[in-house]
Amino acid sequence: MGILLGLGTGAAGCSGSGAAAEDVKGGIDPVTALHRAADALRGAGGSKATTSMEMATGGTRVTIRGRGVYDYRHRLGRLTVMLPEDPAGAAEHRPITELLAPGALFMKNRGAGVPADKWVRVDTATLSDGNLVTGGATDPYVAAEVLRGTRDAAFVERTEVAGTPVRHYRGTADLGRAARYASAGNRASLAAAARGFAAAEVPFDAYLDDQGRIRKLRQRFSFVNGHEKTSVAVASTLLLYAFGTPVDIRLPAPADIYAGRIAEEESGQETGEKSGDGA
């Protein structure tokens, strides 16, 4: 796969603890808060973001890390993604620059035979995971929209993330439901993920600040490796901070997008044609 390869409320879960009961009495329903998390991000404008994606299959575990910024109002992001080191500790690949847009992923320094000054464009609705894991980093706004599919959730505790008071919720989201309620630009991608993953249910831990914005989000996905027919577990962790950061992202012009075919470095297979269409 790729690099390595509001809403109506539902029944809220309850941990049964005094803290959970107090939080619900305070008017904060876990499912409702999680359904609204994506909208809260849009109201925040932009932020900085760090990502971490851990993949495990058999006895092998790898971690991909990213760092960048995101504009929630225009749903555009820019990340620098670092691939794992080789067993000797040396970097195997140059950092990949990714631009995230509704329905599209643009990558530079990606793929054999792609000129250094060209971008590769992928229509995320054509990916079996909707680009929740293919790019090595989950699009922050898409990750938030997965929470629109929350069916059950429980308040765990009040805690802090990087010094910011947050409410920790734990629950499960359904990708099919998330696709139905997602924004138009992400609907097809989430629908593809609902069909393509081994399970459409996504367990998660979400940490929301007092404005309902995501400060930390850990989601767990599972898919079947198409070549080896083995189950691959993926844990995607997102940290959002410095809300209000100005973000200026310009998508590549058609002339800057590579329109040929590229070889998949791990599988030896080719991707489809990369079009020069905009996002």
Image (spheres, rainbow, N blue to C red):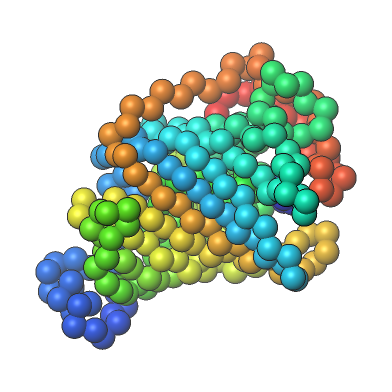
Q: Residue furthest front?
A: 88
Q: Please state if 141 lies on the left or on the right of 104 as rendered.
A: left
Q: Position of residue 227 (x, y in %)?
A: 83, 59
Report the residue at 74% width, 70% height from top. 59
Q: Where on the picture, by quarter, is residue 17? A: bottom left
Image position, residue 5 (x, y; %)? 74, 51
| For residue 64, above or below residue 108 | below
The residue shown at (83%, 27%) is 113
Image location of residue 33, percent across then percent down: 27, 60
Answer yes or no: is residue 72 visible. Answer: no
Q: Residue furthest right?
A: 268
* 270 left or right, relative to 256: right
- In the displayed structure image, the side of residue 100 where residue 268 appears, left or right: right
Quarter-of-image position of residue 23: bottom left
Residue at image coords 75%, 71%? 58
Quadrant in which the C terminus appears: top right
Tell which of 144 and 216 is nearer to you: 216
Tell me: residue 18, above or below residue 80.
below
Residue that extends furthest to the left in the rendered view of this protein = 26
Give the quadrant of residue 154. Answer: bottom left
What residue occupies the far top of the structure in this picture? 255
Horizontal relation, residue 58 to residue 162: left or right: right
Task: Look at the picture and state if 152 lies above or below 180.
Answer: below
Along the line of sight, which residue is nearer the eye, 255 or 112? 112
Q: Residue at x 43, y 35 (%)?
A: 69
Q: Please count the marks in the image.
A: 0
Q: Is residue 263 visible?
A: yes
Q: Where is residue 90 drawn, in percent x and y?
A: 74, 44
Closer to the camera, 226 or 268?
268
